[in-house]
Image: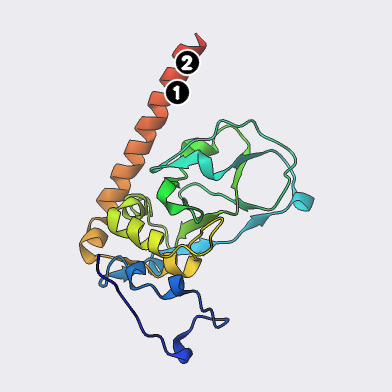
Amino acid sequence: MGVKAVTILTAELAEGLILSPERYDPRRQAHTDGVLLSEVAILSTTSLRPSTVTGQWRVLDTSHAEAGIVRCDRSPVATIGSTKRVLRSGAVIVSRLRPYLRQVGLVDPDLMAGGAQLCCSTEFYVLTSTDEQSIAFLVPFLLSQPVQAALAAGQEGGHHPRFPATLLMGLRIPTARMAQRTADSAAVETAVAQVRAGRAVLAALTGA
């Protein structure tokens, strides 16, 4: 295996003069051309605090998202133990903790059914569209091998490795993938709906 090295000037150090070598790993960029992710999605930081909870909420942990699908089998609650991120239909969530677990998923309309509102762990980055277009196409992009490798290279910390938001928002989406944005988003939404329908059938049969 070859050794890669990179030279960083003091003026190029990340805000706070961070010296962690992971922050400057050249493998953190999956693609060198295309549109910045930050141009098609924003990082939502709308929070729900324990002291401000009203109504019923269903809470997602990182284990509830896997390989594009989000499941929520928890009953609604009226209290929460810690700050959460508020979710809206159409958002894409990606766990910043241990990216190799592929905890990425689309918040589809069916998740919002039942009257209760939806929130998630702050270990999730919550992406929402910069306009009215669907960002469902980001799900397969974030799960693709080059991006997964970049996120793995960007992990910082030993006990609970996480990648920073700057890495996520600085990813470049190749021009070819952007050209397929509408079609890919529709395909992802259809696939998620089909998985949701299949699980509903199995749940009904199991209950019967």
Q: Is residue 130 visible?
A: no
Quarter of the picture containing the N terminus is bottom left
Answer above or below: position of 191 versus 85: above
The residue to which callout 2 is attached is: 204
Q: Position of residue 32 (x, y in %)?
A: 27, 72
Other-residue count near label 2 (Cα within 10 Å), few / some / many at <14 / 14–19 / ≥20:
few
Q: Position of residue 114 (x, y in %)?
A: 58, 32
The residue to which callout 1 is attached is: 200
Dot 1: what SS?
helix
Q: Position of residue 186 (x, y in %)?
A: 31, 45
Answer above or below: position of 118 versus 2: above
Camera-side residue of 95 and 52: 95
Amino acid type, label 1: Ala
As drawn, is 148 to the left or to the right of 2? right
As drawn, is 146 to the left or to the right of 74? left
Dot 2: what SS?
helix
Amino acid type, label 2: Ala
Residue found at the very far left of the displayed protein: 176
Q: Which residue lies at the image location 48% right of the left edge and 62% below the top edge? A: 163
Q: Which mark is residue 83?
A: none
Q: Position of residue 35 (x, y in %)?
A: 31, 69
**CA–CA distance between discs 1 and 2?**
6 Å
Answer above or below: position of 19 versus 83: below
Q: Which residue lies at the image location 37% right of the left edge and 31% below the top edge? A: 195
How many numbered discs?
Answer: 2
Dots 1 and 2: beta carbons under 8 Å? Answer: yes
Q: Which residue lies at the image location 74% right of the left edge and 38% below the top edge? A: 78
Q: Which residue lies at the image location 49% right of the left edge and 8% below the top edge? A: 208
Residue found at the very far top of the displayed protein: 208
Residue found at the very far right of the displayed protein: 51
